[in-house]
Image (spheres, rainbow, N blue to C red):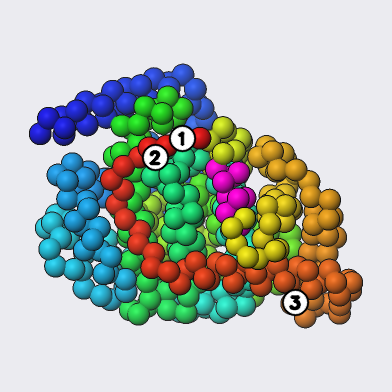
């Protein structure tokens, strides 16, 4: 009881300190994105930066405070498939929440989800690159996300955290993502509970409190910022690379991510109803906030080093840095202090779009075969590493600690 009271006192102190930081430095930009642009076409219009997860947060807070999180995590390691019953022995309040939260929204369109599968099958290689480099490295330039990762348990074991994030991208692209034999519902719900755990624990970290500009992490807006770093960024890159996409596949891909946002606990009034409204939201919540932070630079440096221990020559730090610069642009790479690579940077700048067109069957080999082979071999090695990591058991769990070590 004494330890529990100390945790509550520290949490309260952290909340006060962070609230002061918000008042001092938080941007005063009003929330102007209209709920008329959302899936239901209506909503309260409340600023999502001040909305969290009122269903998951109190339940997970109670699990952590009562010391049941390790036991719950052990039970949930056996729960993988969408149709699989919840394991016996879960606290009743948690079980009730999970049974409710695992239900797909009533607006789910199974035909669109099936079309999304075709999209993912055709574009899997490109999606892996964008999820890994555009989205993954972009996360280090999203200040609130970078701080939340760095000071939470994810910053302590970044490879484990990245693997768990990659699982979401892998599962949504699988053939049976939201079908009974798939795993996407489970992955989303476990991620949602992990987010609730971070929201409970991070305000107890004085390191996070002193650096953050928010009192509670991972707001509805924060989740949508990360959402835009994934599907919206995919579509932006596809347009730049001139990847042809059938309208029904584009709509199906969007729908799969709309369902995902809902399953992660985002209120429907914040989920865009089209690519055009997604763009309008991204221009408000994502584009203006990208900037470097000390935590983000450290995370980017750690990410670039993840390939160093691999026996894959084309996943060197220089090549990964060059791809980051190519996908995110010079300004982002400069912010992250990633130098320009003398061979791979110009190769990607001149050969990538022709490479994509060749793969799409829209262009004869209009570049040196050596350049085509180099890019193709890099992608092969990247996918080899990506898939091999995902073959290992991956357990997304409720955190029980913040990052105990800082570099």
Residue 155 vs residue 87: left or right? right
Q: Residue at x 19, y 56 (%)?
A: 71
Residue 99 to residue 218: above or below: below
Residue 406 circle label:
1
Q: In the image, which disc is placed on residue 403?
A: 2
User: Could you classify mark 2 by the number of other residues whose Cα lies within 10 Å: few (under 14), some (14-19), or many (20 or more)?
Assistant: some
The residue sitting at 80% across, 53% down in the picture is 345
Apparent side of residue 24 relative to residue 16 in the rendered image (left or right): right
Magenta range is 299-307
Closest to the observer, 115 or 142? 142
Image location of residue 127, percent across then percent down = 60, 66
Q: Earlier in the sequence, mark 3 or mark 1?
A: 3
**Front position among marks 3 and 2:** 2
Contact, mark 2 vs mark 1 (Cβ under 8 Å): yes
Residue 150: x and y in percent read 46, 40
Q: Is residue 28 left or right of residue 96?
A: right
- Magenta portion: prevailing SS class: helix
Q: How far apart are labels 3 and 2 at the CA level?
A: 43 Å
Structural distance between the alpha carbons of marks 2 and 1: 7 Å
* Residue that label 3 marks: 359
How crowded pointer 3 is (Cα within 10 Å; few <14, some 14-19, many 20+) is rated as some
Picture quarter containing residue 89?
bottom left
**Is residue 306 in the magenta section?**
yes
Q: CA distance from mark 3 to mark 1?
A: 43 Å
């Amino acid at each position: 009881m004494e330890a529990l009271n100390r945790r509550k006192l520290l949490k309260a102190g952290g909340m006060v300190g962070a609230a002061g930081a918000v008042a001092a430095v938080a941007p005063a930009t009003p929330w102007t994105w209209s709920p008329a642009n959302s899936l239901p076409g209506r909503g309260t219009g409340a600023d999502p930066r001040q909305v969290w997860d009122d269903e998951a947060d109190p339940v997970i807070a109670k699990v952590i405070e009562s010391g049941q999180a390790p036991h719950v995590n052990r039970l949930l390691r056996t729960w993988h498939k969408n149709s699989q019953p919840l394991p016996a022995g879960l606290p009743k309040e948690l079980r009730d929440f999970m049974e409710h939260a695992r239900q797909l929204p009533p607006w789910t369109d199974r035909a669109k989800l099936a079309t999304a599968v075709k999209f993912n099958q055709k574009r899997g290689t490109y999606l892996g690159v964008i999820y890994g480099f555009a989205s993954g490295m972009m996360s280090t330039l999203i200040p609130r996300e970078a701080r939340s990762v760095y000071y939470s348990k994810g910053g302590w074991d970044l490879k484990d955290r990245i693997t768990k994030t990659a699982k979401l991208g892998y599962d949504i692209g699988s053939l049976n993502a939201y079908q009974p034999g798939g795993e996407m519902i489970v992955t989303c719900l476990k991620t949602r509970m992990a987010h609730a755990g971070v929201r409970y624990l991070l305000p107890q970290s004085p390191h996070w409190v002193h650096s953050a500009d928010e009192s509670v992490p991972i707001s509805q807006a924060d989740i949508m910022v990360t959402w835009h770093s994934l599907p919206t960024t995919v579509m932006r890159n596809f347009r730049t690379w001139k990847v042809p996409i059938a309208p029904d596949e584009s709509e199906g891909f969007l729908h799969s991510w709309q369902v995902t946002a809902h399953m992660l606990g985002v209120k429907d009034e914040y989920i865009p109803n089209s690519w055009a409204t997604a763009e309008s939201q991204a221009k408000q919540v994502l584009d203006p906030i990208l900037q470097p932070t000390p935590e983000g630079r450290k995370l980017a440096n750690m990410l670039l080093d993840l390939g160093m221990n691999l026996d894959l020559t084309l996943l060197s730090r220089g090549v990964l840095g060059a791809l980051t610069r190519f996908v995110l642009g010079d300004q982002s790479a400069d912010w992250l202090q990633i130098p320009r690579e003398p061979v791979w940077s110009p190769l990607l700048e001149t050969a990538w779009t022709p490479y994509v067109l060749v793969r799409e069957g829209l262009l004869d080999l209009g570049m040196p075969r050596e350049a085509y082979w180099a890019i193709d071999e890099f992608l092969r090695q990247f996918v080899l590493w990506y898939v091999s990591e995902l073959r290992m058991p991956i357990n997304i769990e409720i955190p029980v600690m913040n990052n105990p070590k800082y570099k």
